Image (tube, rainbow, N blue to C red):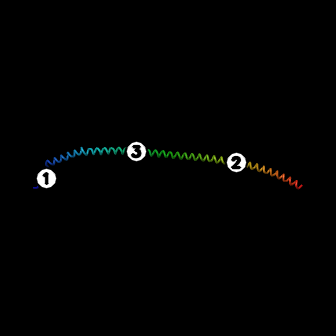
């Protein structure tokens, strides 16, 4: 009969089992626990950074909304101001046009009156000269 040494359970198995268990304890305390702590710390830092990043993102979005709101209000105010200025400009233009028309009408009336006086004066001189020429002609032919 062949003896199978690989399946024999003897004291060496218990020693190897103890060594493996001791190695696991040593690795747990020396390697796995510090690595686990570092991983946990990094995860906590990442979580804190993510939270802070999210808060900053929300602040930026809120600031952008405030800026957009103020820009919208500024646009509305500028359009309203523009409309008021255009209306005011139109009224000033209408006043200037009315004033210019009035001045033109007054100037035309004055000039027409002056021309009328000149015409009357010229007619009077013409009649006087005609009378004078007639008198001379009469003297010549008499």
Location of residue 33 by image quarter = top left
Upstream in the sequence, badge 1 or badge 2?
1
Q: Around disc 1, counting alpha carbons within 10 Å, would you say few (fewer than 14), some (14 to 19), or many (20 or more)?
A: few
In the structure shown, which secondary structural element does the residue marked by tag 1 occupy? helix
- Please tell me which residue is depicted at 29% across the width and 44% down the height of the picture: 38
Under circle 3, the secondary element is helix
Local packing at callout 2 (Cα closer than 10 Å; few below 14, some 14-19, many 20+) is few
Q: Earlier in the sequence, mark 2 or mark 3?
A: 3
Spot the residue most to the right.
142
Left or right, residue 118 beside residue 26: right
Q: Are marks 1 and 2 in contact (CB under 8 Å)?
A: no
Residue placed under numbered mark 2 in the picture: 107
Query: Could you tell me residue 47's position as x and y percent?
Result: 34, 45
Q: CA distance from mark 1 to mark 2?
A: 138 Å
- The residue beneath circle 1 is 5
**Sequence-wise first label, 1 or 3:** 1
Give how far apart the Cα atoms at labels 2 and 3 are.
73 Å
At 33% from the left edge and 44% from the top edge, which residue is drawn?
Answer: 45
Q: Is residue 51 left or right of residue 72?
A: left
Which mark's residue is nearer the viewer, 1 or 2?
2
Spot the residue most to the left.
1
Give the alpha-carbon distance from disc 1 to disc 3, as whole Å: 68 Å
Q: Provide the residue designation for mark 3.
A: 56
Mark 1 near mark 3, Cβ–Cβ under 8 Å? no
Identity of the residue drawn at 46% across and 45% down: 67
Q: At which x and y percent is residue 81?
A: 55, 45
Q: Is 87 in front, or is 136?
A: 136
Residue 93: x and y in percent read 62, 47
User: What is the crowding at mark 3: few (fewer than 14 residues within 10 Å), some, or many (at least 20)?
Assistant: few
């Amino acid at each position: 009969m062949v003896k199978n040494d690989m399946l024999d359970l003897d004291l060496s198995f218990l020693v190897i089992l103890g060594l493996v268990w001791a190695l696991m304890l040593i690795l747990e305390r020396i390697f796995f626990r510090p690595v686990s702590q570092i991983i946990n710390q990094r995860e906590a830092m990442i979580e804190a950074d993510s939270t802070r990043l999210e808060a900053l993102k929300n602040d930026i979005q809120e600031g952008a909304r405030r800026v957009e709101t103020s820009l919208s209000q500024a646009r509305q105010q500028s359009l309203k101001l523009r409309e008021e200025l255009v209306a005011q400009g139109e009224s000033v233009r209408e006043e200037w046009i009315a004033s210019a028309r009035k001045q033109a009408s007054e100037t035309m009336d004055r000039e027409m009156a002056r021309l009328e006086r000149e015409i009357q004066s010229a007619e009077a001189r013409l009649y006087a000269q005609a009378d004078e020429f007639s008198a001379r002609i009469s003297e010549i032919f008499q």
